[in-house]
Image (tube, grey):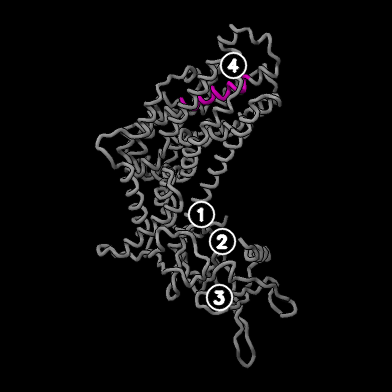
Amino acid sequence: MAESDCRNENNLTLSSSTLASLYSWIGNGQPVNHFVSQIQTMRTEEQHAPELSLETNSAEDAGSLEESSDSLSQLEDCSPPSDMSSALWSVSKLFLSVLDDEDSGTEGAADPAEEETLDVSFQSKYIHVFPLYQDYCLQMVKEGLDRMNKGFVSRLISAQYVQGLQSRLSLPCPSETASPQLNSAEPTPSSPPPQPIRVTPCTLWQNLDEVKASGLLNSLTSREIRLQETTFELIGSEASYLRSLGVAVNHFYASKALKQTLSRMEHHILFSNIRRVMAASEKFLMDLEIRLGENILISQVGDIVLSHCPQFHSLYVPYVTNMMYQEALVNQLLQQNRDFLYSIKKLESDPVCQRQSLKSFLVLPFQRITRIRLILESILKLTEPDRDSILNLEKAIEAIHEIVTDCDKGVRKMKQIEELVCLEMLLDFGKVKAVPLVVSGRFLVHQGPVRQLIVEAAYSPRVSFISIYLHLFNNLLIISTKKDQKFTVVEYAEFPTHVHLEHLKTEVLGLPPDSFLLRLSQSQMGQPTAMILVTHTRSDKEAWVEALSSKQ
């Protein structure tokens, strides 16, 4: 995906804070299309609000977000906000109104997520047996699993994941790297120094008292024992995960001192729907432990995973989508909010955290949903092909894969929308009829500077070059001139309907070798236009030829 050219200080603020609030709403399960509709509706309202002197965008009807296949001349006017502060105000207003809708209702009513958690009257048998999830995988490896095949262990936990855990455990707490001016003010509690990972015994299926008493170990083959161990690893790792989620929710989220350092919006962005994620984990672990209680020889778990996948999808996709803005907000708060920094250091120094940082707790859901699939795939490899559990296992793996895929799509979609919002702040349509940039389904494909070759008609024709800038979207091409970080639009056309690239015989025509002809069969002026464009390098030309030749 092309990167938006928005690197000045204001734009960075827009990405890390304004858009953090904007996209964290997606974490509440709201469709992207409806979200874009709300932005456009809000802009229309602000344009007619007498108390505001903001130059904002009018919009298409909120219920008609899909782009029309008609020409661009049918698109409504859409002038960009006058500055970044107006964009910040608009997005913040939108997000806060959403929070107000969420919090509306009977005064004193319990939060749905809290009710959901209280409804699960379940005490895990294993939650205190296993370490925090941050330590779990490394402890499994360090404990040895001596009775198991090394190849099996390598499938159980990826080397990259172990390396990542090791690097995080060896680094100082992120909050210790805050800006010097904050650290030099009043003293704050220091986070404990990093320590080597504590290795405590992790329970194996074959070490359970029930298994030893049953005598099963004498009758099972090595493969069957490995299958039970892998299946039990799903239970043990979920207990470890739930234990860490408990710290994230009961220690960090529930901290009144931390909440007082944040606005309601910031608190919501920081923790997203993690309480609901914890409630779902608790139900999932309960079902797994019930299955184990029914028969110590676990026949299958694919059906349990499959039954929980719809809820996992509704919770994990919004959470993971919000993560990049969550991290950006944490970094910003550590740099700019002294009270937040003090509170986080104090919370992280508590023994319940076991020297783990807030960030390590916030990233848990992403780590877990990807880990579940690896465990299920290991179970599948060890399951005999003729077993009845095969079908459910395959369906569960596919369902988890779909969740992970949709998480990736959600992150990609949010980055695309962020890119459009940022660009809209930088585009100045001037005398050209404005076109709304942030519309459903649009994303940036390629951008960059090129030179337009101009032949000046005179007694002896002379050739000169004009520097222009192209923004190519999947359905729109914008041509502008660039000054500093602003772009003044001079032309645009629907892509690919009215945009055509033609190769030139540069040697015959005496043109620079990196030239090509760009034809606009219908532009915003309604007239056909042709221009010879020259890129700065051969690789630039190849990139533009490929982008402009695609049909998106």
Q: Which residues are magenta?
A: 228-243
**According to the image, label 2 marks what residue?**
474
How far from the left and from the top, in percent, is residue 478? Answer: 52, 68
The answer to whether mark 1 and mark 3 are in CB contact below 8 A is: no
Residue occupying the point 66% across, 17% down: 225
Q: Give the structural element (helix, strand or loop) at label 3.
A: loop
Q: Residue at x 37, y 62 (%)?
A: 83
Under mark 1, the amino acid is Gln
Q: Is residue 236 magenta?
A: yes
Question: Which residue has dot 1 on it?
Answer: 416
- Label 2 crowd bin: few (<14), some (14–19), many (20+), radius 10 Å: some
Q: Amino acid at mark 3?
A: Gln
Residue wearing tag 3: 522
Q: Nearer the viewer, residue 314 or 27?
A: 314
Residue 205: mark: 4
Q: How many marks?
A: 4
Three-letter code for the amino acid on which mark 2 is drawn: Asn
Task: Work out whether residue 292 can be spotted.
Answer: yes
Alpha carbon separation for disc pair 2 and 4? 53 Å
**Upstream in the sequence, badge 1 or badge 4?**
4
Q: CA distance from mark 1 to mark 2?
A: 11 Å
Going from N to C along the chain, the mark reached first, 1 or 3, is 1
